[in-house]
Amino acid sequence: RVIMGNSSSSKSAEPPKRLHPLVSNDEYGRLQEVYKSASEHSGGFGDWLIGKLGLPADDEGVVSRIFQGPHGTGAVEEAEFVNVVSTVVRGSTSDIRRKLFGTVRGESYKSDLESMFRLLFHASGWEAGADMSVLVRGLERFARKQVKIDAGLIAGPSSVNDVAPVEINFGTFNRWCNTHMPSLQDPIYRLFGSVFFDMEGKTSLAGMVQATARENIAASEVITQSTAFSLACLDARFQGGWDRLFSSSVDGLSFDALVKSTLSYDGPTFFAIKDTLGNCFGAVTSETWKESSQFYGKESSLLFGISPVFYVFRSRTDGSTPGTGNFQYLKSRGRTGAQGIGFGGDENKVRLWIDRNIEECTASESGLTYESGRLLGNTDETSFVPLVIEVWGLGGDEASKAQKEAREEHTKMQMDRRKVDRKQFANNAFDREFLLGKTFEASHQAEEHGFN
């Protein structure tokens, strides 16, 4: 006789129910232990939290609102603590941004946005305070533009310079992040991941802006720490090394020196300009600069205002329209064609133009290559007078090495050419007699006129 066992005991044990969809039960348990230590802290949850995260005391209010909501007060429950930390570290990009935007209260949205941006600035490893009003003004301008686009008043990116009141909701904030600050949420993700989940190599965004770059940026007359943070959140090209190739304060406001410092740099370059009215703006390109009577470049090129409004103008992607591929231009010699450095547009109207004489510089509001909008925030004019021009190389050590080798090769070719010319000159009796005779005659005339 065969005795059958209990049918229920023959089944394999089912896995325990997951306590949270984003973390394992072991991780959930560790977060519970962390919460327990927070609840026992005599200074309160907010004080414990900024101490745990290593943030300035000024960030306590905004950090607490990430857990409590914009109007939240009182104690943070264990379940909410676990949920917020899990969402920030394991949630989607949109989920993290929603938690950040949840700190913004309607009646004080400007100051709350500045506090939130400043928190992320500190979370990225920068210690000094920062003026984040340029980001708030940029978000407001973006929101006004979106209202007009959604209403069908403008078909696409266009210049919006009014100061009408505007409502900023999460949808607008999320879209702005996508186009202007794609990596804005990274500092809080990295910081929470490092502190609460022991994520190696994720301590902060500071590692994305190299220590040597931060030292170089400190000497800039155009770029502030908050600008560097904003640019690092905008584009990965700003997250590595920054090598200053040119500074008009050091090298003089010389077009020839500007060109020499830029040519043959085999990596992304960032032009940062400050005009006499205090406007700061710039452009970043990825293709190596070269002398040409034609435009060239790549779609990854960008124009942007830096101050008083941080705003990004991306390249238009419709390659069928003439002029959409005209990303960069450099011409410093030759009898034909305009001499200068340009970004976007065409030979008749360059969007951002630095003239050879550095006198007739322009920054237009529209063009064929980049999205429309005002680069000069403090004036309706399109012409400007540069006060400071800086060029930064973003390609790292390899790009700097390649430029140095190219310069050395160019110098060697020039020396070789001079040797050949001198040899040919020495072997040609007619040239020697004719040219030297003219030289002696000119010298004699100069002596007679007292020039020697």
Image (cartoon, rainbow, N blue to C red):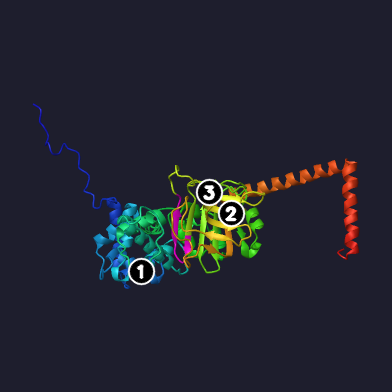
Q: Which region of the structure is painted magenta?
A: 305-315
Front tag of 3 and 2: 2
> Could you tell me which quadrant the N terminus lies in?
top left
- Residue at x 24% of width, y 64% of height: 77
Query: Is 265 rendered above or below residue 145?
Result: above
| Residue that badge 3 annotates | 286
Label 1–label 2 contact, CB within 8 A? no
State the separation of the CA atoms marked 3 and 1: 35 Å
Percent across and percent down for residue 292 are 61, 46
Q: Could you say which quadrant of the image residue 176 lies in?
A: bottom left
Give the class, few, some or many, for how many residues have Cα within 10 Å of label 2's Cα (few <14, many ≥20): many
Magenta stretch prevailing secondary structure: strand
Label 3–label 1 contact, CB within 8 A? no
Horizontally, is 371 left or right of 394 in the view? left
Horizontally, is 22 left or right of 448 in the view? left
Which amino acid lies under the numbered mark 3 shown in the image of this protein?
Ser
SS state under label 3:
loop
- Residue at x 42% of width, y 53% of height: 200
| Residue that badge 1 annotates | 110
Would residue 166 be counted in the magenta stretch? Answer: no
Percent across and percent down for residue 443 are 89, 58
State the separation of the CA atoms marked 3 and 2: 15 Å
> Which of 137/49 is in front?
137
Mark 2 or mark 1, which is nearer the start of the sequence?
Answer: 1
